[in-house]
Image (cartoon, rainbow, N blue to C red):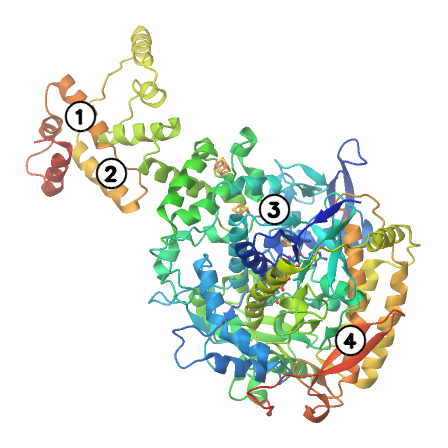
Amino acid sequence: METAVLQVFRYDPEKDQAPYYKEYEVPVEGTLLNALLYIKDNLDPTLAFRAFCRSEVCGSCSMKVNGKTKLACKTPMKELVETWKGKPLRIEPLNHMKVIKDLVVDIDKPIEKMKTLIPWLVPDPRVVPTDPMHESIIYPEEMEAYKDQIHCMLCFSCYSACEAVADNERYRGPFAFSKAYRFQVDRRDIETAKEKRIRYAISGGLWSCVQCQKCLYVCPKGVKPAEDIQNLRGQAVKKGFTDKPGAKKLKHFVDWIYATGQINRLYLPEEVYGNKEAREKLTKAYTEMGVEVWEVPKPTKGLMKFRDIYLEILSKEDKALDLDYSHVRKIDKMVSDIFKADICTIVDKAHEEGRSSRGLISKLKGLLGGQ
Amino acid sequence: MVELDYDIVIVGGGGAGLYAALWAAENTILKVAVMTKVYPTRSHTGAAEGGINAVLTHSVGDSPEAHAYDTVKGSDFLADQDAVDIMCKMGAAVIYDIAHRGVPFSRRPDGRIAQRPFGGASFPRTCYAADKTGFYILQTLYEQCLKNNVTFLNEWFLLSIIHNGERVEGITAWDIRNGGVHLIKTKAVILATGGHARVYWNRTSNALGNTGDGTAAALRAGLPLKDMEFIQFHPTGLAKTGILVTEGARGEGGYLRNKDGERFMKRYAPEKMELAPRDIVARAIQTEIDEGRGCGPNGDYICLDLTHLGEEKINERLPQTREHAILYEGVDPVKEPIPIAPTAHYSMGGIDADKLGRTPIKGLYAAGECACISVHGANRLGGNSLLDVLVYGRLTALEAVKYADEAPETNPSVAKAKDDEKRILELMEADGKEKVADLRKELGNVMMKHFGVFREEKSMREGLEKVMEIKERAKHVKVYDTSKKFNTDLITALEFLNLVDLAPAIAVPAIERKESRGAHARKDYPKRDDKNFLKHSVVKLKEDGTYELSWKPVTITKFPPEERKY
Ligand SMILES: Cc1cc2nc3c(=O)[nH]c(=O)nc-3n(C[C@H](O)[C@H](O)[C@H](O)COP(=O)(O)OP(=O)(O)OC[C@H]3O[C@@H](n4cnc5c(N)ncnc54)[C@H](O)[C@@H]3O)c2cc1C
Ligand code: SF4
Ligand code: SF4
Ligand code: FES
């Protein structure tokens, strides 16, 4: 029978000074969970790990194999042997949680963290009937909004893989944001709860996620925390929670790109961090180095068309990355002051006459207070 | 010895336990705790795929009476009809309640909860949430418990129940994480510890820990167990592992074929075909296999064919089935039929409880799969267990609240806790002549062989002897891990010892029930015998270690027994 060697992390804090690895020879048959059960039944009953359903629904058995997060009952031994070409397989407990024993880690902390994000439905009495014999109507299309998030089985794989958890103790964890987001997009959930969730998400590190996407790759259930976090950020901005540097940065990007087609490196420090001296210092430094800088980037050719597309994308996606029109208007004003002409005139000049999408442009002009 | 003090302790964090906790939390200011050996969301309720039966306000033509009739007929007339009536009438209420709390039930285009046909039901009344119904219910109930700040004792293991012959006084439990036996004082206890199909260790759809711990503790505390001979074999377990293929696969239109490609169900249940109740389908499959019409090189399985449903429908309605078939059987149901065979799935029998979940001991309740109310009688209909779990979780919670509100303080003696401590120490000091893993496997094989889909006097007597022998040998099993923290070696041993206590409680009434009824199919008595056996079996464990059998009448209200034909 084909066999493989598992190097299993062993640590009993009561007895062992330090963790060590113990080697076991196991058959290459079935899943990694089968191999661990084989060890327990035949080689060493003292090995501790969690497992229950053995069919990838309970979330008990996630662990690391050669550094990669895996769900033991979902990982065929054959696949491991092929991937690692017969090299020993190092089996270790998840990261970022205290080891209780061997492969068993303390998951109370991530659960407590999740709890702070109100990961439950707070029904809106205008939508959810209070009469227990009254059904609440939900259209199948509506459920699309949270069809992935509801698959989270609290296996903590993503928590273990997450860069932000590594950096920041307070960071709530990828799954926790997904759990919270699931209710943010549920029509039945009351607005006040949604508001609170955003507030708590922000204090729980919403802007600390570095978008490394690891959570998304390791999730055995197809949940995409990284995306949910982006969407939560969008909601935060839309709800007016724009006082965090992350939100301000986003606003800076969106508004400047919309207004001029480029971000503005001179204004970034001021707009995001409120640093008023930065602009002058930067201008001076750039000039000294002989680098050409503009206080305001010159609007590019075709900007209005570009704005159309941008607006269309934003409205279609409803990613809630709302433009701050008063900010945009300020930028426009800077542009017209510097270039001595109304922004539409400048751009229009650069355009050929008689463009087709006139309708949208004039709507835009109205919006922007242009002519 | 640390002592904890509550008013109500709910043992079990599955569907029954969590729903009980929720209803208790919302209806009392008493101190309530949920104790569970695995984190609540990991309980086996999460594996329930197919759905939950209930007649809703928009179910056309259907009625709670029709549901009750189907349930009673499905039970082969062994269910207590007063209890069935309560359960079926509460269907809509519990479904709407959990839907309002966030369970993402699949919906019809008009936004109402969708229902699909399920085995043994005369109308499509199974509400479902894709093919993860139990998972979503469990997650939602857990969320709602967090919302209500329910106290959890996660990763605690129930050892014993303490009572004074009249009232419950407390329990003892092992704290898995830190080690140590604890005495817990409480006025009321709801047992919601799930089923014991792991008695059939090697061929079961159940989680590794469905070892009937609460049922065994009740047995050891002198409580009666009811109808233990009835074990449901699910017709469609994956051939290699026993892992379940949901009944939804047949509900969506899957075919069962033998090695000749024949849809053999037409010979067993011409009208219902693949949608006949589980016991009938399981026996049909077993008969095909036994008579040489099985598929594969050893002829030991049957084919479940979904290929004609098409990839889109399979992905939409049965995504998990597809995933499991690929992962655990190496077969993609879009392209090939899935090899399946019957697998031990559900325990109809359990702790004897009445129509409100009360046991003979005051303050002690049982709900969910560990209980035998009995709403399932000799055979449970698919989708009825989750309903039972919710209805009785809620009813027992309300009963327990009412009781604990007025009950006097209890004063459990430490003797039991000291006993349990000794028992655990002895396990660690045993001679180790026998190994848990080996004995457990042996027990599973004996039970499958002698108390499987088909049963027979001679074979069962042999089987019981072997079971008693294994029970004897089990005294020599040793726990090698002597550490306190997260000692899974100890837990595994305790679970096995529970299985060993329960096996004879299944075997004894199985031998004495000389008829075929529901899941209890005897080759030597192929007919149902209402004259002699329209009654519940009751097993008690006596001080001397023998199992005492008695009988108890069935409550019949509306539906007189008739032949069960599909
Ligand atoms: C694969 C599968 C699919 C199914 N599909 C369906 C379906 O589609 N429809 C349907 O109606 N039914 C279905 N069933 C049946 C149904 O899922 C179960 O009967 C039901 O979930 C049992 O719920 P419960 O709350 O009673 O127990 P469980 O969910 O099993 O929970 C038991 C709880 O008790 C705890 N516990 C156990 N022992 C101890 C101890 N010693 N100390 C402390 N705590 C303990 C556990 O930790 C757990 O929390 C299915 C069953 C299986 C196996
Ligand atoms: S994308 Fe964000 S949440 Fe996901 S792992 Fe990276 S840092 Fe963590
Ligand atoms: S999001 Fe995925 S990886 Fe993270 S806990 Fe949930 S199921 Fe596990
Ligand atoms: S054992 Fe349940 S997910 Fe692996």
The CA distance from mark 2 to mark 1 is 17 Å
Chain name for mark 4: B
Could you say where residue A310 lies in the image, as x and y percent from the top left?
A: 24, 38
Q: CA distance from mark 2 to mark 3?
A: 40 Å
Give the spatial CA distance, label 4 vs label 3.
45 Å
Callout 3: helix, strand or loop?
A: strand
Amino acid beneath label 4: Val
Tell me the amino acid under the disc marked 2.
Answer: Tyr
**CA–CA distance in space, label 4 to label 2:** 74 Å
Residue hosting label 2: A310
> Where is mark 1, residue-wise?
A332
Describe the element under mark 1 as helix, strand or loop: helix
Q: Are marks 4 and 3 in contact (CB under 8 Å)?
A: no
Label located before the other in sequence (3 or 1): 3
Q: Where ligand 1 lies, by image quadrant?
A: bottom right
Question: CB at mark 1 closer than 8 A to ligand 2?
Answer: no
Circle 4 residue = B539
Q: Is residue B36 above or below residue A214?
A: below
Label 2 CA crowd tier, 10 Å (few <14, some 14–19, many 20+): some
Q: Are marks 2 and 3 in contact (CB under 8 Å)?
A: no
Are the residues under badges 3 and 1 in a single subunit?
A: yes
Residue type at mark 3 is Lys
Residue, disc 3: A70
Q: Position of residue B494 (x, y in %)?
A: 79, 57
CA–CA distance between discs 3 and 1? 52 Å
